[in-house]
Image (cartoon, rainbow, N blue to C red):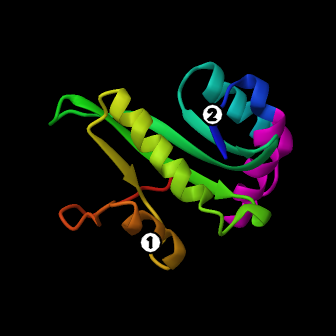
Amino acid sequence: MRITQASLEHLDQLLPMFIRYREFYGAMPQQIDSKTFLTERISREEAIILLAFEHDLPMGFCLVYPSFSSVLLRPIWIINDMYVTEPSRRKQVAKQLLQAVAQHARENNVVRLRVSIHASHEIAQRLYSAADFIEDKQFTSYILPL
């Protein structure tokens, strides 16, 4: 398995996975808008997207948004999206993507990785626990839909 950071050259390989990921969460495909969204995130360097490949076949991706901690005066990264293609599941793709993200974060002086997952998503809970993520029991998250 090879993991690489996505560039605009990878859009044709990334886009179908991104659309399937969105559909999993109930979003409409919106192919043109999805491509525009990914193009903007990559070209503006607003996101880090790691892609996993086996030979030349895409297996999955992990999309991370850089942010900062005012208290720690250092960068933090938010793992926002993780997707593994159906044929690639149970091949440790997500685990290797997480390891690659963590290594890339360490190389960039990031103090912490953060991820939010649905409370009923047990597979994701096991994945992140096995990768040494700890459940945040100190802070409660709130959202304001706009």
> Which residue carries the number 2 mark?
4
Q: Is residue 62 left or right of residue 32?
A: left
Tag 1, which secondary structure?
helix
- For image coordinates 55% across by 49% down, the residue present is 97
Q: Residue 19 in magenta?
A: yes
Q: Residue furthest top?
A: 44
Q: Residue 114 in magenta?
A: no
Q: Nearer the viewer, residue 16 or 105?
A: 105
Tag 2, which secondary structure?
strand
Picture coordinates of residue 13, whole percent (x, y): 81, 39
> Which residue carries the number 1 mark?
125
Q: Is residue 35 left or right of residue 140?
A: right
Dot 1 surroundings within 10 Å: few (below 14), some, or many (20 or more)? some
Picture coordinates of residue 146, whole percent (x, y): 51, 51
Q: Residue furthest left?
A: 71
Between the residue at mark 2 and the residue at mark 1, the CA separation in whole angstroms equals: 25 Å
Q: Amino acid at mark 1?
A: Gln
Q: Is residue 26 left or right of residue 68?
A: right
Question: Mainly helix, strand or loop, the magenta region?
Answer: helix
Q: Amino acid at mark 2?
A: Thr
- For image coordinates 59% across by 54% down, the residue present is 82
Picture coordinates of residue 35, whole percent (x, y): 78, 35
Dot 2 surroundings within 10 Å: few (below 14), some, or many (20 or more)? some
- For image coordinates 40% across by 67% down, the residue present is 130
Disc number placed over residue 71 in the picture, else none:
none
Where on the picture, by quarter, is residue 73?
top left
Q: Which residues are magenta?
A: 12-32
- For image coordinates 22% across by 61% down, the residue present is 139
Residue 114 seen: yes
